[in-house]
Image (cartoon, helix red, strand yellow):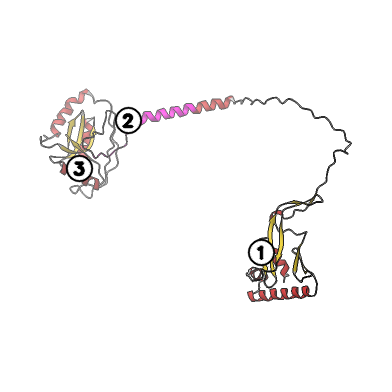
């Protein structure tokens, strides 16, 4: 088993106070590097002092013995009491108690406990391994070595060197820039007429201009009148052409318009719109899809040089709102148009 003084020394590295019950407490405080009168530079250290009035057991030393000696707490207290008893016996007989790496305990003439810290020990971890340094005074007056005069030279102001760029890097950077600009121009030219679909709640808004494109989205949820076993429809994007149809098909289109468009009552002014097209054939295609899905009242109305495909027209705006809400529940898109 290690000596009690060794455990005290180990605890002083991490604790500022280590109490030995019934004997006293050892105190440690950090000190800066000092220069002795004999020109000896001492590294930073922890100064050790002793206070005879700190005798109450705080359990620090006993728990350290339990952890490192693998004994019980009661056995640790017995070892400490035995150590203190031997120390007091030596002190009363006039002997000095030398604690390795800590210091020396002794009685003075008034029978008071005195402590003298060890000089060669250092309990500061940051100064571990450092030793004192003897400083040597240099006397320049007795130095007979001739000195060379210092030469002062004018320092030319430094100029930043011009950075040279490899011609190959210049060419590569220019090529990358041209490719990036070309790619951006191609992307804008392809996506110039594409607009994300929007939902409109206000009936007076007309969310279309001369270059707008509508994305018509079919869904696999149909109204109650549609067939339940029908396969779900695929998402289809319809692009509005920027050029009118051929003049040769004008007569055919007018004939189909007269056959398909029913007469709209003058009292019907609220329509639930499914899509708007510039080309009549595209409007008829969407109308056929709505008929297939069970919207028997679906039709096409021409206005503002556009073909408006609607689910149904109503005299009362409340009915139109009701149908539009039911479309939203079935994940179908629509908006109300006042005509």
Alpha carbon separation for disc pair 2 and 1: 82 Å
Q: Please report the bounds of the magenta region as a residue range.
A: 177-201
Alpha carbon separation for disc pair 3 and 2: 30 Å
Q: What element carries label 3?
A: helix
Q: Nearer the viewer, mark 3 or mark 1?
A: 1
| Left-right relation of 109 to 209 | right
Q: What element carries label 2?
A: loop
What residue do we see at 53% from left, 27% from top? 173
Q: Nearer the viewer, mark 3 or mark 2?
A: 2
Quadrant in which the C terminus is drawn = top left
Instruction: Give the class, few, some or many, for how many residues have Cα within 10 Å of label 1's Cα (few <14, many ≥20).
Output: many
Instruction: Give the class, few, some or many, for how many residues have Cα within 10 Å of label 3's Cα (few <14, many ≥20).
Output: few
Measuring from the top left, give residue 328's x and y in whole percent: 24, 45
Q: Mark 3 points at which residue?
A: 292
| Left-right relation of 195 to 177 | left
Q: State whether residue 160 is above or below residue 329.
A: above
Disc 2 and disc 1 in contact, CB within 8 angstroms: no
Q: What element carries label 1?
A: strand
Residue 17 circle label: 1
Going from N to C along the chain, the mark reached first, 3 or 1, is 1
Q: Nearer the viewer, mark 2 or mark 1?
A: 1
Q: State whether residue 206 is above or below residue 100.
A: above
| Residue 267 occupies quadrant | top left
Q: Does the magenta stretch include residue 203?
A: no
Disc 3 and disc 1 in contact, CB within 8 angstroms: no
What residue do we see at 41% from left, 27% from top? 185
């Amino acid at each position: 088993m290690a000596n009690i003084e060794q455990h005290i020394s180990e605890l002083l590295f991490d604790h500022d106070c280590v109490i030995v019950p019934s004997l006293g407490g050892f105190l440690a405080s950090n000190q800066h590097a000092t220069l002795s009168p004999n020109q000896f530079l001492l590294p930073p250290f922890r100064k050790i002092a002793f206070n005879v009035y700190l005798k109450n057991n705080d359990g620090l030393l006993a728990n350290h013995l339990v952890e490192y000696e693998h004994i019980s707490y009661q056995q640790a207290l017995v070892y400490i009491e035995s150590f203190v008893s031997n120390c007091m016996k030596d002190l009363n007989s006039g002997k000095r108690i030398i604690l390795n790496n800590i210091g020396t305990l002794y009685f003075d003439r008034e029978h008071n406990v005195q402590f003298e810290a060890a000089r060669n020990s250092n309990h500061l971890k940051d100064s571990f391994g450092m030793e004192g340094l003897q400083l040597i005074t240099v006397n320049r007056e007795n130095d007979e070595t001739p000195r060379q005069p210092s030469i002062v030279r004018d320092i030319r102001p430094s100029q930043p060197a011009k950075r040279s760029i490899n011609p190959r890097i210049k060419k590569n950077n220019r090529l990358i820039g041209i490719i990036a600009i070309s790619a951006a121009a191609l992307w804008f030219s392809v996506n110039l007429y594409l607009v994300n679909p929007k939902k409109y709640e206000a009936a007076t808004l007309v969310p279309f201009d001369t270059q707008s494109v509508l994305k018509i989205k079919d869904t696999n949820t149909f109204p109650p009148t549609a067939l339940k076993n029908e396969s779900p429809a695929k998402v289809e994007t319809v692009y509005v052409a920027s050029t009118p149809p051929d003049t040769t098909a004008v007569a055919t289109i007018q004939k189909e318009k007269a056959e398909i468009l029913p007469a709209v009552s003058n009292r019907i002014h609220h329509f639930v719109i499914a899509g708007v097209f510039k080309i009549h054939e595209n409007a008829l295609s969407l109308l056929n899809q709505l008929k297939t899905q069970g919207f028997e009242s679906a039709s096409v109305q021409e206005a503002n040089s556009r073909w408006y495909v609607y689910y149904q027209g109503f005299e009362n705006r409340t009915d139109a709102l009701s149908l539009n809400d039911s479309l939203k529940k079935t994940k179908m898109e629509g908006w109300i148009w006042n005509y």
